[in-house]
C-alpha cells in the first residue's frame, strides 16, 4: 500500500459535542490503524460490521467473555491473513523464493516447496474452520466461551516457513510481474527471512504500542530465528508436554547416535525439533505416554 498524497478523510458523526470524550478514543484507534496499514508490507482490508447487523440483534445480547472473544478474533485475523498470503504466493510463485533448510539457501518457489506451501495452507484452513466453529459455540445461549490458546499453533510458526519476495519485487503499489531475478547474495538467509516475516512486522506493532499483542520481545524474535528450518509436533497429552518442558529428557537419534535438539514451548502443546529427530521424538513421546498412564 503506497502513501496517498491526499488520503481520504473519515468523519465521526456524534449527537453532540459532549460525545467527543468517548469518540476521541475511536478516532485515535482509526489513526493507529491507518498508520499500521500504510507501513504494512502488502495491502490488506478491514471490514467493520455494526452491532445491529449481527444475526442475534435485537433478540438477545452477546453474553460471552470479552477476553476469550478478543483472543479468538486475534487468531482468526492472523490465520486469515496467513491464508491470503499463501494463496498469493501460490498464484505468483515466480515472484518468490523459499528457504531450503537442507542447503540453508533461498531457492525458487517450485516443485516440492510449492507442495509444502499447499500443505501449510491446508493446515491454516483447518485452523480457521476450528476457530469459526468455536466462535459459533461462544454465541450460543447459556454457553461459556472458552478458548484453548495453547492448542493453536502460533501464527509465527507458519510465518517462518513462508516464502519471501525476490530482491527486485515490489508487492504493493504496482501489478506484479514475473521478471523477478533470483537472489545473488545468499549470506544471512535466515536473518533475511526473520527480518521480513517476523522482526519487521513485530517492530511495527511495537511502534504503535510496546504492549500491542503483535509486539515481540527481542528474545522472542531470536526464538523464532532458532526454529527456522525445524519441524513442530503437537503433543496430545499435556502431562507429557510438561515432562518434556521440565525434565527435558535427552533425545538421541537411534541411527546416528547423535543427540537431537528439541524445544518444548511453555504453556502450549507444541514441541520444535530437528528435522532428523522425528522418529526419536515420537518414540520418546510414546515412552512418556506409557509412563503417565
Image: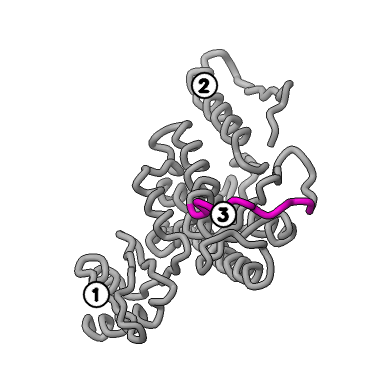
- The secondary structure type at the circle numbered 1 is loop
Q: Looking at the picture, how far across and down is residue 221, in whole percent?
A: 41, 48
Q: Nearer the viewer, residue 74 or 49?
A: 74
Residue located at (42% from left, 76% from top): 276
Residue bearing mark 1: 250
Chief secondary structure of the magenta portion:
loop
Residue located at (42% from left, 57% from top): 145
Residue located at (55% from left, 47% from top): 196
Q: How many marks?
A: 3
Question: Marks 1/3: CA distance?
Answer: 34 Å
Range drawn in magenta: 178-190
Q: Nearer the viewer, residue 252 or 40?
A: 252
Whether residue 13 sits left or right of residue 64 in the image: it is right
Q: Nearer the viewer, residue 106 or 218?
A: 106
Note whether 151 is above or below 55 in the view shown: below
Give residue 24's mark.
2
Give residue 133's mark.
none
Quarter in which the N terminus is drawn: top right
Quarter in which the C terminus is drawn: bottom left
Local packing at callout 1 (Cα closer than 10 Å; few below 14, some 14-19, many 20+) is: few
Note whether 92 is above or below 2 in the view shown: below
Give residue 186's mark.
3
Amino acid at each position: 500500500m503506497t502513501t496517498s498524497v491526499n488520503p481520504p478523510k473519515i468523519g465521526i458523526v456524534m449527537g453532540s459535542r459532549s460525545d467527543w470524550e468517548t469518540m476521541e478514543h475511536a478516532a485515535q484507534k482509526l489513526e493507529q490503524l491507518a498508520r499500521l496499514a500504510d507501513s504494512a508490507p502488502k495491502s490488506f482490508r478491514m471490514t467493520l460490521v455494526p452491532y445491529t447487523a449481527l444475526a442475534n440483534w435485537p433478540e438477545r445480547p452477546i453474553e460471552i467473555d470479552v477476553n476469550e472473544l478478543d483472543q479468538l478474533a486475534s487468531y482468526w485475523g492472523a490465520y486469515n491473513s496467513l491464508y491470503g498470503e499463501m494463496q498469493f504466493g501460490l498464484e505468483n510463485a515466480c515472484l518468490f523464493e523459499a528457504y531450503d533448510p537442507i542447503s540453508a539457501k533461498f531457492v525458487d518457489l517450485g516443485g516440492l516447496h510449492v507442495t509444502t506451501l499447499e500443505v501449510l495452507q491446508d493446515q491454516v484452513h483447518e485452523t480457521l474452520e476450528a476457530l469459526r466453529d468455536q466462535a459459533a459455540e461462544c454465541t450460543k445461549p447459556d454457553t461459556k466461551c472458552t478458548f484453548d490458546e495453547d492448542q493453536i499453533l502460533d501464527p509465527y510458526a507458519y510465518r517462518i516457513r513462508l516464502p519471501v519476495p525476490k530482491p527486485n519485487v515490489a508487492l504493493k503499489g504496482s501489478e506484479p510481474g514475473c521478471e523477478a531475478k533470483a537472489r545473488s547474495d545468499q549470506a544471512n538467509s535466515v536473518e533475511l527471512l526473520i527480518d521480513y516475516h517476523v522482526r519487521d512486522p513485530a517492530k511495527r506493532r511495537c511502534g504503535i504500542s510496546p504492549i500491542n499483542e503483535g509486539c515481540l520481545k527481542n528474545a522472542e524474535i531470536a526464538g523464532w530465528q532458532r526454529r527456522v528450518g525445524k519441524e513442530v509436533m503437537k503433543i496430545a497429552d499435556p502431562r507429557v508436554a510438561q515432562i518434556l518442558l521440565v525434565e527435558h529428557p535427552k533425545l538421541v537419534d537411534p541411527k546416528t547416535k547423535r543427540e537431537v535438539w528439541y524445544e518444548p514451548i511453555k504453556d502450549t502443546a507444541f514441541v520444535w525439533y530437528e528435522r532428523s529427530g522425528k522418529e526419536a521424538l515420537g518414540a520418546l513421546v510414546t515412552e512418556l505416554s506409557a509412563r503417565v498412564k
